[in-house]
Image (cartoon, rainbow, N blue to C red):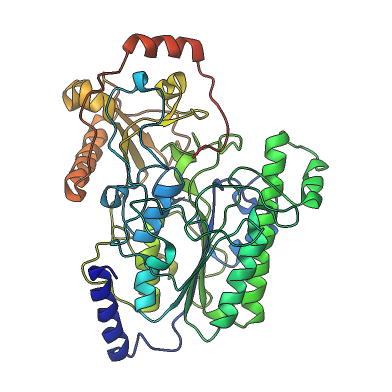
Amino acid sequence: MNPRRFIIAVFFAVFTLLSGSIIAADRPNIVLIFADDLGWKDVGYQGSAFRETPHLDQLASESMTFSQGYAAAGNCAPSRACLLSGNYTPRHGVYAVGSTDRGQKDLQRLVPVPNRSGLAAANVTIADALKGAGYATGHFGKWHLGGKEGADPTEQGFDVSFDSFGEGAVIEGSEGNKAGPPEDPKGVYTLTRKACEFIEKHREGPFFVYLAHHAIHTPLQARPETLKKFQEKPGSPGKVETIAAACTYDLDDSVGIFLAKLKELGLEENTLLVFTSDNGAVQDSSQEPLRGSKGGYYEGGIREPFLVRWPGVVKAGSKSDVPVINIDLFPTFLAAAGASVPEGKTLDGESLLPVLEGESTLARESIFWHFPGYLDNPVNRGRELDVRTGFRSRPVSVIRQGDWKLHLFLEEWQLDGGRGALPGNHAVELYDLANDQGERVDLSSENAAKRDEMLDALLAWHQLIEAVNPTEANSSYDAAATLQKGEKRGRKGKGGGEE
């Protein structure tokens, strides 16, 4: 066992024996259902015009729904690393899937910060903390945090880990995405069944379930009868969206099965349940009025469906416009369990309990994102330079503070004069989300005072968290090639489910 983990395990064992609150029978069970690539508008209760999610819609009516719930990164692996560790990306170094050096090299102005392949075993997770506090812990589905620098789920606090695409178990910590058999698309029913078996076994509680579905990541797949339903539904926006709607419907159906099991076992009244997604949708699913999609840091790439049901604590049908982010779940779950933050562990999020209990604000002033690399394959309504040159994202750091959101583009910041050359170097974009949630009107020149205030806060956070920024100019960069590619591409982007 990692020495740090051993110390934490001993601490929690002693704490559990000594603390009456920790061993109290009324501690809630905790369930996190995590979708893959499900965008903000991809569910019925968020206003989808074509997709149908009756079980999630019902769940929303019993929950607090957050209109401004965020993932802490724009694609799969870094978002999951943030969620499970409770840390922003600079603390764990997982910035992308595979590599931060993705895209045509001669179009990259900076040498990207290297990516870690997975979440290091020494990084204490939600599962570590809850297991130490006496919870049975189970992981079902996608992991995506292994690799040579990562660890498997059972090395990071989970008693049980099971993954499948519907055709038997796959090796723990496996990566990749594939279809399942026709009757079990993406393995949604197998994963749900295994999670149901786990909660039945541990019905005396408390337990923590992390049900991390592969749906609706590509390859898109649905049961034949579900696909037929949506093929025959009027108003189809196209073949891809039709099968995505069908895939979403089957995911929703599996959620209904899990909810029914909770009710059957008499557990729903004492279960804190969260549903959200790892990142925004791929661009075949428009998130308008939100800008962008998966892989980018405009709202469409990071804003998610986000709901919390906790009978007796959370008012059914309540809504919150407080900005929240998936790193908040670690401290929220600890607070709900009456458990302390593990010794030596730094958490970047904030417990949502005050908001869940009816408060209208949280203590913090800002939330942040940091991506110091390159992702290829542009998105709809992405940044013009990125769309023209074939990128979803270039190196960027982002702050949201109240209704304001600022993007700091690190190429222009590092190479084109920084603060002294604003606004002419286009290193900063500023948006008022209260009046412009689609991020259409850049106010960085018009409201220089707000721009500078937020820029100061973002740079101070860089220092506080020791964020690593790319600073070295890329010797392979070819400005002429950039111009030429931009002229050929125009504003046309590519779709798909790229990581």
Q: Give the residue at x 67% y 43%.
A: 244
Q: Nearer the viewer, residue 241 or 199?
A: 199
448 to the left or right of 133? left
Examine the image and state in which quarter residue 486 appears: top left
Q: Would residue 209 be seen by someone viewing this image from the given angle?
A: yes
Q: Nearer the viewer, residue 449 or 3?
A: 3
Q: Position of residue 50 (x, y in %)?
A: 70, 43
Where's the N terminus, which quadrant? Answer: bottom left
Q: How many marks?
A: 0
Q: Nearer the viewer, residue 228 or 214?
A: 214
Relative to residue 95, is residue 187 depicted above or below? below
Relative to residue 38, is residue 381 depicted above or below? above
460 to the left or right of 41? left
Q: Give the residue at x 34% y 66%.
A: 331
Relative to residue 248, is residue 112 depicted above or below? above
Q: Would residue 325 be seen by someone viewing this image from the given angle?
A: no
248 to the left or right of 9? right
Q: Nearer the viewer, residue 288 or 160?
A: 160
Q: Position of residue 368 (x, y in %)?
A: 31, 46
Q: Position of residue 67 (x, y in %)?
A: 49, 52
108 to the left or right of 381? left
Q: Position of residue 487 (x, y in %)?
A: 46, 10
Q: Give the residue at x 60% y 43%.
A: 218
